[in-house]
Amino acid sequence: MKKTTAIILSALFICTSLLCGCSSESKPQSSSAEASSTVKEKEALALEKGTTYTFKTKEIWCENNGNKIYGIAYIPDTNKKCPLVITCHGLGTNHEAGIGYAEHYAKIGVAAYTFDFCGGTKSSDTNKSDGKSTDMSVMTESADLEAVFNTAQTWDFVDTSRIFFQGGSQGGLVSAITGVRLKDKIAGMILLYPAFGMYDFVHRAYPSYDSISGTMEIVNDMVIGEAFGKDLWNYDVREHLSEFTKPVIIIQGTEDSIVLPSVTEQAAKLIPNCEMKLINGAGHGFGGAELDEAANYAMEYLYKNC
């Protein structure tokens, strides 16, 4: 691959370490409480403001086409079936990006599952799932998410009628792509600075579909393959957003220079049932107080739509 192309793509994907937002610094820790029910058919949990729960964490592996997918479930301490939010990280990050949100959700009675996409980071040291980054694309990640969704329907703590997707940046794009495909099966989506413009990035980086070949190095030494560009060349999810009629919330930083607020606002108008929240002064990725603000918006959405 020509060096100039790699440089162009590096500029376009300058956000590798940020693409899913700042990961919560907290590490997965189980609460002392354990869900004890062995009842096969559980009653669905009704969310009530002011009611809080302790929770436990559990490592759960899923599988997609022979690849193992690593993730951690955050399970509220209740004998009832809970809503579930499946969180999707962005390019170059991992399941830890979803921890801060998962902890917020579990405390109000919403289970969460945060996982590593296959090949979603440059190293097995930071990604416990199978797969190589050179084989990864938004479509392989969409297949991973669908595999997780299918597996989650077998978990006894999940109310399968209330499963939501959440994703940050590329994870938001993947959530939207998969959500459109599963529009009759999921309950809604929480999208954080979703990278709807990734289709445009690919078309700026390459003059034609046939010019996409080989591998290239992007920011932070992560190497991606030609599947990344080829899988996006002929697919722009914005052309399909109108098909998703379930409730959606988009949360966007006003100072995001990677996913521009104007691009997000244009995409939000294409979604029939969408609300958009802006976090003043926030860039690409939320941490600290910004993450708390985003989680509060998301929890209000869950109270309203669960």
Image (cartoon, rainbow, N blue to C red):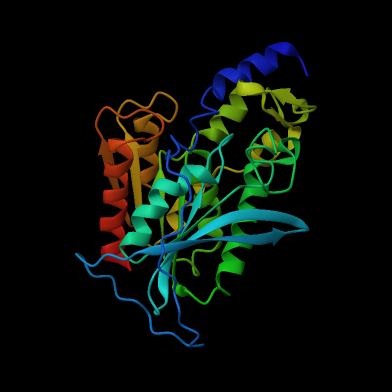
* Residue at left offset 61%, top offset 68%: 151
Q: Is residue 37 above or below residue 164?
A: below
User: Which percent across, then down, holds residue 128?
Assistant: 66, 46
Judging depth in this view, the residue of 77 and 306 nearest the camera is 77
* Residue at left offset 40%, top offset 79%: 79
User: Which percent across, then down, holds residue 19?
Assistant: 50, 33
User: Which percent across, then down, holds residue 291?
Assistant: 33, 40
The extreme top residue here reads 4
* Residue at left offset 68%, top offset 47%: 118
Residue 218 in view in this figure: no
Q: Is residue 210 above or below residue 7?
A: below
Quarter of the figure with the C terminus:
bottom left
How many marks the image carries: the answer is 0
Quarter of the figure with residue 143:
bottom right
Judging depth in this view, the residue of 3 and 291 nearest the camera is 291
User: Which percent across, then down, holds residue 73?
Assistant: 51, 60
The extreme left residue here reads 50
Judging depth in this view, the residue of 24 and 246 nearest the camera is 24
Quarter of the figure with residue 281:
top left
* Residue at left offset 45%, top offset 38%: 23
Residue 290 in view in this figure: yes
Quarter of the figure with the N terminus:
top right
Q: Is residue 281 above or below residue 116?
A: above
